[in-house]
Amino acid sequence: MNLRTRMTRFAMIVGMFGAATGLAAPPVAAAVAPASAGSSVEATVSRGRLGPLTDLVIERIRVGDDVAASKFGTDSPIEDPVREQRVLEQVRKQAVAAELDPDAAVAFFRDQITASKVVQKGLFARWTAHPQEAPTTRPDLGQIRERLDRLTTDLLAELKNTERVRDRPVACSVQLALATASGASRERLDRLHRQALKAATPSVCRTGAGGPAARR
Protein backbone atom coordinates (compact mmCIF):
# COMPACT_ATOMS: atom_id res chain seq x y z
CA MET A 1 0.00 0.00 0.00
CA ASN A 2 1.55 3.31 -1.08
CA LEU A 3 1.62 6.46 1.06
CA ARG A 4 -1.10 8.23 -0.91
CA THR A 5 -3.47 5.28 -0.39
CA ARG A 6 -2.77 5.31 3.35
CA MET A 7 -3.44 9.07 3.48
CA THR A 8 -6.75 8.54 1.68
CA ARG A 9 -7.85 5.85 4.12
CA PHE A 10 -6.82 8.04 7.06
CA ALA A 11 -8.97 10.87 5.73
CA MET A 12 -11.93 8.50 5.43
CA ILE A 13 -11.45 7.43 9.06
CA VAL A 14 -11.38 11.09 10.12
CA GLY A 15 -14.66 11.66 8.33
CA MET A 16 -16.29 8.70 10.08
CA PHE A 17 -15.04 9.82 13.51
CA GLY A 18 -16.30 13.33 12.87
CA ALA A 19 -19.76 12.06 12.01
CA ALA A 20 -19.82 9.81 15.05
CA THR A 21 -18.92 12.60 17.44
CA GLY A 22 -21.19 15.26 15.99
CA LEU A 23 -18.29 17.44 14.82
CA ALA A 24 -18.03 17.99 11.14
CA ALA A 25 -14.63 16.65 10.15
CA PRO A 26 -12.98 17.93 6.97
CA PRO A 27 -14.69 16.26 4.00
CA VAL A 28 -12.64 13.60 2.28
CA ALA A 29 -12.69 15.64 -0.89
CA ALA A 30 -11.06 18.51 0.97
CA ALA A 31 -8.74 16.34 3.02
CA VAL A 32 -7.32 14.55 -0.02
CA ALA A 33 -6.91 16.77 -3.02
CA PRO A 34 -6.05 15.41 -6.47
CA ALA A 35 -2.28 15.24 -6.75
CA SER A 36 -0.86 17.28 -9.57
CA ALA A 37 2.58 16.83 -11.08
CA GLY A 38 5.20 18.10 -8.69
CA SER A 39 2.81 18.43 -5.74
CA SER A 40 4.00 17.05 -2.39
CA VAL A 41 2.15 14.25 -0.62
CA GLU A 42 1.83 16.29 2.56
CA ALA A 43 -0.10 18.99 0.68
CA THR A 44 -2.93 16.47 0.18
CA VAL A 45 -3.62 16.19 3.89
CA SER A 46 -5.93 18.70 5.58
CA ARG A 47 -4.64 20.52 8.65
CA GLY A 48 -7.95 19.95 10.43
CA ARG A 49 -9.53 22.15 13.08
CA LEU A 50 -6.46 22.05 15.31
CA GLY A 51 -4.09 22.97 12.49
CA PRO A 52 -3.59 26.62 13.52
CA LEU A 53 -2.90 25.59 17.13
CA THR A 54 -0.48 22.89 16.07
CA ASP A 55 1.30 25.32 13.74
CA LEU A 56 1.96 27.61 16.71
CA VAL A 57 3.17 24.66 18.80
CA ILE A 58 5.63 23.72 16.05
CA GLU A 59 6.77 27.33 15.77
CA ARG A 60 7.49 27.38 19.49
CA ILE A 61 9.37 24.09 19.21
CA ARG A 62 11.49 25.62 16.44
CA VAL A 63 12.35 28.52 18.75
CA GLY A 64 13.89 25.87 20.99
CA ASP A 65 16.67 25.57 18.40
CA ASP A 66 17.58 29.21 18.96
CA VAL A 67 17.35 28.79 22.73
CA ALA A 68 19.79 25.89 22.51
CA ALA A 69 22.14 27.88 20.26
CA SER A 70 22.10 30.81 22.69
CA LYS A 71 22.96 28.57 25.66
CA PHE A 72 25.38 26.04 24.18
CA GLY A 73 28.92 26.57 25.39
CA THR A 74 27.83 28.98 28.13
CA ASP A 75 26.95 28.67 31.81
CA SER A 76 23.22 29.03 31.03
CA PRO A 77 21.48 25.79 32.03
CA ILE A 78 18.75 24.08 30.05
CA GLU A 79 16.69 23.74 33.22
CA ASP A 80 15.56 27.14 34.48
CA PRO A 81 12.90 26.55 37.17
CA VAL A 82 12.65 30.24 38.12
CA ARG A 83 11.97 31.33 34.54
CA GLU A 84 9.58 28.41 34.01
CA GLN A 85 7.56 29.28 37.10
CA ARG A 86 7.38 32.91 36.05
CA VAL A 87 6.10 31.90 32.62
CA LEU A 88 3.44 29.60 34.11
CA GLU A 89 2.27 32.26 36.57
CA GLN A 90 1.86 34.71 33.69
CA VAL A 91 0.00 32.07 31.68
CA ARG A 92 -2.41 31.57 34.58
CA LYS A 93 -3.15 35.30 34.75
CA GLN A 94 -3.67 35.58 31.00
CA ALA A 95 -5.88 32.49 30.97
CA VAL A 96 -8.15 33.93 33.64
CA ALA A 97 -8.42 37.18 31.69
CA ALA A 98 -9.30 35.21 28.54
CA GLU A 99 -11.89 33.12 30.43
CA LEU A 100 -9.91 29.93 29.89
CA ASP A 101 -9.52 27.17 32.45
CA PRO A 102 -6.27 28.32 34.12
CA ASP A 103 -5.26 24.83 35.25
CA ALA A 104 -5.70 23.44 31.75
CA ALA A 105 -3.75 26.35 30.26
CA VAL A 106 -0.89 25.86 32.72
CA ALA A 107 -0.82 22.12 31.95
CA PHE A 108 -0.64 22.89 28.23
CA PHE A 109 2.22 25.35 28.65
CA ARG A 110 4.08 23.02 30.97
CA ASP A 111 4.08 20.62 28.04
CA GLN A 112 5.43 23.37 25.76
CA ILE A 113 8.30 23.96 28.17
CA THR A 114 8.99 20.22 28.30
CA ALA A 115 9.04 20.08 24.51
CA SER A 116 11.53 22.94 24.34
CA LYS A 117 13.81 21.09 26.75
CA VAL A 118 13.56 17.95 24.60
CA VAL A 119 14.93 20.00 21.71
CA GLN A 120 17.62 21.69 23.76
CA LYS A 121 18.89 18.45 25.30
CA GLY A 122 18.88 16.71 21.94
CA LEU A 123 20.79 19.48 20.24
CA PHE A 124 23.29 19.78 23.09
CA ALA A 125 24.00 16.05 22.77
CA ARG A 126 24.31 16.32 18.97
CA TRP A 127 26.62 19.31 19.06
CA THR A 128 28.77 17.80 21.80
CA ALA A 129 29.20 14.59 19.79
CA HIS A 130 29.70 16.47 16.51
CA PRO A 131 31.32 19.86 17.25
CA GLN A 132 31.47 20.68 13.56
CA GLU A 133 27.66 20.90 13.60
CA ALA A 134 27.53 23.33 16.54
CA PRO A 135 26.24 26.85 15.83
CA THR A 136 28.83 29.49 15.08
CA THR A 137 26.68 32.41 16.22
CA ARG A 138 24.79 32.92 19.47
CA PRO A 139 21.25 34.37 19.22
CA ASP A 140 20.24 36.93 21.81
CA LEU A 141 18.30 35.14 24.55
CA GLY A 142 16.39 38.31 25.47
CA GLN A 143 15.00 38.62 21.94
CA ILE A 144 14.15 34.93 21.91
CA ARG A 145 12.14 35.33 25.10
CA GLU A 146 10.23 38.22 23.55
CA ARG A 147 9.27 35.86 20.70
CA LEU A 148 8.21 33.24 23.21
CA ASP A 149 6.06 35.79 25.05
CA ARG A 150 4.31 36.69 21.79
CA LEU A 151 3.76 33.01 21.06
CA THR A 152 2.27 32.58 24.53
CA THR A 153 -0.36 35.20 23.71
CA ASP A 154 -1.09 33.62 20.32
CA LEU A 155 -1.30 30.12 21.77
CA LEU A 156 -3.72 31.22 24.48
CA ALA A 157 -5.92 32.85 21.84
CA GLU A 158 -5.93 29.63 19.82
CA LEU A 159 -6.74 27.57 22.91
CA LYS A 160 -9.78 29.81 23.31
CA ASN A 161 -10.71 29.41 19.64
CA THR A 162 -10.57 25.62 19.86
CA GLU A 163 -12.35 25.06 23.19
CA ARG A 164 -15.34 23.31 21.64
CA VAL A 165 -13.19 20.85 19.70
CA ARG A 166 -10.83 20.18 22.60
CA ASP A 167 -13.69 19.49 25.01
CA ARG A 168 -14.78 16.46 22.96
CA PRO A 169 -12.11 13.80 23.58
CA VAL A 170 -12.68 11.46 20.64
CA ALA A 171 -13.13 14.19 18.05
CA CYS A 172 -10.19 16.11 19.52
CA SER A 173 -7.94 13.04 19.34
CA VAL A 174 -8.76 12.57 15.67
CA GLN A 175 -8.29 16.24 14.84
CA LEU A 176 -5.02 16.38 16.80
CA ALA A 177 -3.64 13.32 15.00
CA LEU A 178 -4.55 14.91 11.68
CA ALA A 179 -2.99 18.27 12.58
CA THR A 180 0.24 16.88 14.03
CA ALA A 181 0.79 14.46 11.15
CA SER A 182 0.15 17.22 8.62
CA GLY A 183 2.31 19.76 10.46
CA ALA A 184 5.23 17.39 11.02
CA SER A 185 5.19 16.38 7.35
CA ARG A 186 4.77 19.89 5.98
CA GLU A 187 7.53 21.30 8.21
CA ARG A 188 9.73 18.26 7.56
CA LEU A 189 10.41 17.76 11.24
CA ASP A 190 13.27 15.41 12.03
CA ARG A 191 13.10 12.72 14.69
CA LEU A 192 14.11 15.07 17.51
CA HIS A 193 11.51 17.68 16.66
CA ARG A 194 8.82 15.04 16.20
CA GLN A 195 9.63 13.81 19.71
CA ALA A 196 9.25 17.38 20.93
CA LEU A 197 5.90 17.71 19.15
CA LYS A 198 4.70 14.55 20.87
CA ALA A 199 5.81 15.98 24.23
CA ALA A 200 4.01 19.27 23.50
CA THR A 201 0.54 17.89 22.80
CA PRO A 202 -0.71 15.55 25.63
CA SER A 203 -2.78 18.34 27.21
CA VAL A 204 -4.39 19.65 24.01
CA CYS A 205 -7.48 17.43 24.34
CA ARG A 206 -9.40 17.93 27.57
CA THR A 207 -10.79 14.75 29.03
CA GLY A 208 -12.88 16.08 31.91
CA ALA A 209 -12.40 15.97 35.66
CA GLY A 210 -10.31 12.80 35.54
CA GLY A 211 -8.20 13.88 32.56
CA PRO A 212 -4.56 14.92 32.40
CA ALA A 213 -5.30 18.61 32.70
CA ALA A 214 -7.11 18.07 35.98
CA ARG A 215 -4.45 15.78 37.42
CA ARG A 216 -1.56 18.18 36.97
Image: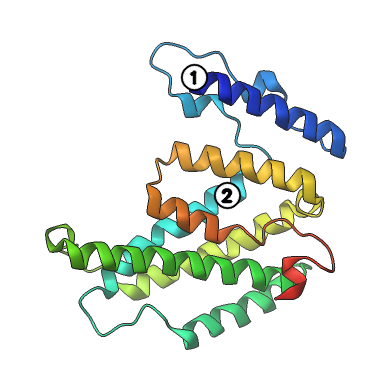
SS for callout 1: loop
For mark 2, what is the residue?
A: 54
Instruction: Name the foreground residue: 55 vs 80.
Output: 80
CA distance separating discs 1 and 2: 26 Å
Hey, what amino acid is under mark 1? Asn
Whether residue 147 appears in this view of the structure is: no
Where does residue 108 sit, x and y in percent of width and height?
A: 63, 66
For mark 1, what is the residue?
A: 2
Which residue: 43% across, 69% down? 117
- Asked where in the image residue 67 lies, by quadrant, the reply is bottom left
Instruction: Name the foreground residue: 9 vs 146.
Output: 9
Which residue: 48% across, 43% down? 184
Q: Is residue 191 left or right of residue 73?
A: right
Instruction: Name the foreground residue: 58 vs 154.
Output: 58
Q: Is residue 8 left or right of residue 12?
A: left
Whether residue 21 appears in this view of the structure is: yes
* Numbered label attached to residue 132: none
Which residue: 76% across, 59% down? 206
What crowding class fits label 2: few (fewer than 14 Cα within 10 Å), some (14-19), or many (20 or more)?
many
**Looking at the image, how many numbered discs can be counted on the residues?**
2
Where does residue 208 sit, x and y in percent of width and height?
A: 83, 63
